[in-house]
Image: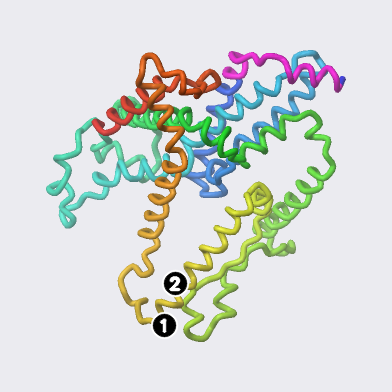
Amino acid sequence: MLHSSIQQNQRQPRFVLAVLIGIGLIPFNAYWIAVVSGIYHSLNPAYASLYIAPVINLIGLLFLNRLLIRIGLPLYRAELLIVYQMLVMLCLVSGHNPMDFQLGTLIYPYWFASPENEYATLFHKYIPDWFTVQSRSVLRPLIEGESTLYTAAHLSAWMKPVLLWSGIIFTLFFVLICINSIQRHQWTEREKLSYPIAQLPLEMTNIGFLRRRWLWIGIAISASIQILNGLNFLLPAVPAIPLKFPRFGAQIFTAKPWNTIGQLPLYFYPWVIGLTFLVPLDLSFSVWFFFLLTKLQLMVGSIGGWKSLPGFPYYNHQGLGAWITLGLVVLWQSRNHLRSVLAKGTRSNADSSNTLDEAEEPMRYRSALSGICIGVALLVAL
């Protein structure tokens, strides 16, 4: 049985079957994400960097596959990974930030317009009617509830904005795919980046993953803690295992200038602890080092009298500078590769000295460069 399972996992994947399974799972997962994130505000299955929803779906498919193997209709490893990746893309589109933030931003200018803030006079005339929903009669049921989206008036009002923003999101992700197609060789073959989050689904689809004893011991420990704490929330008489100490720092540092660092909360989330095993050492160092550096800035600002300055120590500005610097570093490290890509993609007959092979890339470099230019132009125009 094991030998036949290995052979099955090495066979050519049935792409259409995998896509159909992914399409079938997408509505249920989208509903799950919307309910948990938008209604109950619980742990969002599409919030953390390693999305919960695709992992849980993959575990379910692995259990189902054990039955399918017995009847001779197994799902191969590549098919499982295709389904997993489709659900990851779903989380990118319908997760916490796109839905919660974008929807709120779109309806804010009209629902919260009043004579006092003069939104209508200031900028309503600059927003096209197809850009968002402007009718308060349509927005009222969305804000106050007691209604449904599925009425003719609501659907017709939301049709244009949904199609527009779906096109914007599709174009944005298409541009990102083109960029990844260009950078894949540099990041994977030359810099040998590890992509630690991608290691989990690859490991999960290996033969014998569900038969690992330590896996189930870890699941049992973390699940027991969460279930016990959940029962304590519902029934306070049930004992709980504390995982959160939000005022840890405030209880220790009480004298100046140490008390200016604010909170040093301690949280012991089992899923975060598990995720840290995938974090590279240099990235782990950066996380805690720069967290302590921000606290040090607060203390130095208190000593120097700068804490009273509005916005000090300007976290957002420092973060923007860090992102710009990171982007420039990536471009500098990839300069030779990007030069070869431009030569390969802009010349009809590339010179023989350009040994860059695009046979294994998702798309040809010329197509990727054209896609970036067209996509960015569409985004700017919209």
- Residue positioned 26% across, 33% down in the render: 380
Q: How is the image coloured?
A: rainbow
Q: Secondary structure at mark 1?
A: helix
- Residue positioned 50% across, 68% down in the render: 293
Q: Is residue 177 above or below residue 195?
A: above
**Cα–Cα gap, marks 1 and 2:** 10 Å
Residue behind mark 1: 303
Residue 309 falls in image quadrant: bottom left
- Magenta span: predominant SS is helix
- Residue positioned 40% across, 77% down in the render: 301
Q: Nearer the viewer, residue 56 or 328?
A: 328
Q: What amino acid is found at the position of numbered circle 2 in the picture?
A: Gln
Q: Quadrant of the N terminus?
A: top right
Residue 110: x and y, percent?
A: 24, 44
Q: Is residue 15 above or below residue 292?
A: above
Residue 181: x and y, percent?
A: 48, 27
Work out whether residue 157 can be spotted: no
Magenta-highlighted residues: 2-20
Residue behind mark 2: 297
Q: What amino acid is found at the position of numbered circle 1 in the picture?
A: Ile
Instruction: Confirm whether the magenta stretch covers residue 91.
Output: no
Q: Nearer the viewer, residue 13 or 331?
A: 331
Residue 341: x and y, percent?
A: 42, 27
> Residue 316 — which label?
none
Residue 125: x and y, percent?
A: 14, 40
- Residue positioned 38% across, 81% down in the render: 304
Crowd rating for badge 1 (residues with CA inside 10 Å; few <14, some 14–19, many 20+):
some
Left or right placement of residue 365 versus residue 380 in this view = right
Instruction: Confirm whether the magenta stretch covers residue 14.
Output: yes
Q: Is residue 80 above or below residue 104?
A: above
Q: Are marks 1 and 2 in contact (CB under 8 Å)?
A: no
Q: Secondary structure at mark 2?
A: helix
